[in-house]
Amino acid sequence: MKIFVCVKQVPDPNTTLSKLDPNTKRLMRSGVTLVLDPGDESTISAALKLRDTLGNSELVVVSMGPASTQEALRRALAMGADKAILVTDPALAGSDALSTARVLAAVLKKEGADLIFCSTESTDGYTGMVPGGIAEFLSLPQLTFAREIKVEGQKAIIKRVTPTGYKTVECSLPAVITIASGSFEAIYPTMKGIMGAKKKPFSQLSIKDLGLDPSQVGEAGARERVLVIGKAEARAAGQVIKDDGNAAQQIADFLQRYQLL
């Protein structure tokens, strides 16, 4: 079985406060520490667990981004992935969630993916739209918020996290699965894994390799635009009620005024 994990390189959320460039209105990536998205590390762990359970399977990590994204993919290989694919092309600059999904879907179709893992959302964009976009472009079912995954024959079966517990959901393969945050503990690379990663297959593709036109990606193909960047409004001070004997009535009146009673 060919298992793929879509990953992303992001500004380190533990050390960097993400900022937008006021001119390009894009996320600033120069002068900051870039890492494999921590959420993707958990997703890779989920995929590794399934690969090792199934046996006779290959785990491939795929990403879209600038040349620096190689570092994030090398970490994924050091964690235990078998192969890495990076799509990098100047035409991809300014891609939105739709373009990103289009590009990743083209890779996955080209490679013949049986099972595709994604994090629910990235820790820089937080759109949560890319996994669904991939499933749509490939006409595949999508299982979301998985905390446990197993494969039986040509079916994927998950326990899907809900506000009150979980549901057991299944679909036919191939499929896209998103992993619920905190459901799998990240695997940290060992020295042996880091050294071994240097010898694992690593390929780079351009949009031409994928049969995509520049008009379909980057700013040319984007359907989202950041129009204005501004500061969030300061939170107004709340109303403080001191209990001088009629606090309960004041609270009741407040709730009634806003039709909360």
Image: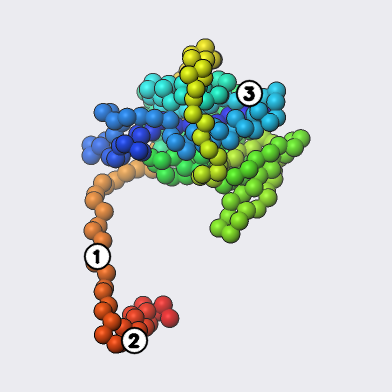
Task: Tell me which label, 2 or 3, sits earlier in the chain.
Answer: 3
Q: Please name the colour scheme applied to the rendered image.
A: rainbow
Residue corresponding to mark 3:
58
Across and down, in percent, residue 180 comes to: 54, 45
CA separation in Å, label 2 and label 3: 66 Å
Quadrant of the image for the C terminus? bottom left
Is residue 176 or residue 181 the one in the foreground? 181
- Residue 249 badge: 2
Three-letter code for the amino acid on which mark 3 is drawn: Glu
Q: Is residue 34 above or below residue 17?
A: above
Tell me if residue 248 can be seen: yes
Q: Is residue 241 above or below residue 36?
A: below
Across and down, in percent, residue 184 comes to: 55, 40
Three-letter code for the amino acid on which mark 2 is drawn: Gln
Residue corresponding to mark 1:
236
From the image, state whether disc 2 or disc 1 is nearer to you.
Answer: 2
Residue at 46 percent of width and 24 percent of height:
75
Disc 3, SS: strand
Residue at 51 percent of width and 17 percent of height:
192
